[in-house]
Amino acid sequence: MLLTVPDILHADEVRQIRAQLATAAWGDGRASAGEQAARVKNNEQLPHDCEAARTARAMVLRGLDRQPLFLTAALPKKVFTPRFNRYGGQSNHYGEHVDNAVRFTDSGQRVRTDVSCTVFLSDPSDYDGGELVIRDTFGTHQVKLPAGHAVLYPGTSVHQVTPVTRGERLACFFWVESMVRSDEQRRLLFDMDMALMQLRQAHGESSATVALTGTYHNLLRLWADT
C-alpha cells in the first residue's frame, strides 16, 4: 500500500527543523548504507546522535503520534529512530535499491522494515528533480510532496531518489515494524477502518457499524503480533 499522509508536521515545526538542520554538520550518507545500497547512494546524512537530529526527530515522532491516518495505516509496533538526509550539489541522488529487511537500533534492538516512510521537509518549489520513485506490482510511482507531508510504502519496494538538479531536498526517513506483517492484510484493515469512519459520519452509530467494528478487531486480533 502506498499512501500519502498529510500534515505530519505543521508549518512552524518544519521551519524549526529546517533552522536546526541549516547549521548542523552533515556527513556522507553512504556510511549508514548496506553494501548494495552504498554503490548507488550519493547524498548527505545527519549524524543521528547530534543535537539537531535529536531535536528534529522528537518533533517528527510527536507528529506521528497525533496523526491517526499514520497509526491506522502502519499499525506500528516499533518505529526505527528517524534519520535525516539532504540532496543537492554533488551529493544529489540515490539509485534503485531495496531497504534492508531488518535494521538495528543503537541499543541493538531489531526492527523489521515492513513499512518505509519519508517525511518531506522541503517544498517542491525549492528544488528540481529529487522525486521519490517507487516500483511495485502496480507500476512506478513518483512522489514529491509539500513540506510536512509523508508517504508510506512497503519496505519490499524497489525505490530511488532521482538527481536533484537545482536547490536542496531535505527529508526525514524511517521504518516501521507493523503489528500486522502482511501488506495485503494491512491494506484490508485500513480500507475497512476508512469505510467504517464514513459510515459513522453518514449514519451515526448503528448495529451494523458495531458488527463491522467487531469484525475489524477480530481480524486485527487474528493477524496482529504484539
Image (cartoon, rainbow, N blue to C red):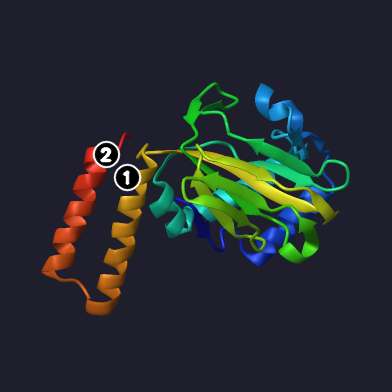
Q: In which quarter of the image is residue 7?
A: bottom right
Type of amino acid at the residue the image marks with label 2: Trp
**x then y, percent, for residue 20:** 77, 50
Q: Are marks 1 and 2 in contact (CB under 8 Å)?
A: yes
Viewer-nearest residue: 52 or 38: 38
Three-letter code for the amino acid on which mark 1 is drawn: Gln
Tag on residue 223? 2
In the picture provided, is 88 more to the left or to the right than 152?
Answer: right
What is the C-alpha distance between the residues marked 1 and 2?
8 Å
Name the quadrant containing residue 44: top right
Q: Considering depth in this image, is 45 or 66 the residue closer to the camera? A: 45
* Residue 88 visible at all: yes
Residue at the image position 65 percent from the left and 47 percent from the top: 172
Label 1 element class = helix
Q: Position of residue 10 (x, y in %)?
A: 62, 64
Q: Which of marks 1 and 2 is nearer the N terminus?
A: 1
Q: Which residue corresponds to the image point at 66% horizontal and 25% vertical from the top-left?
A: 36
Q: Is mark 2 on a helix, strand or loop?
A: helix
The image's mark for residue 185 is 1
Residue 206 higher or lower than 185, as above or below: below
Residue closer to the observer: 182 or 120: 182
- Residue 197: name its quadrant: bottom left
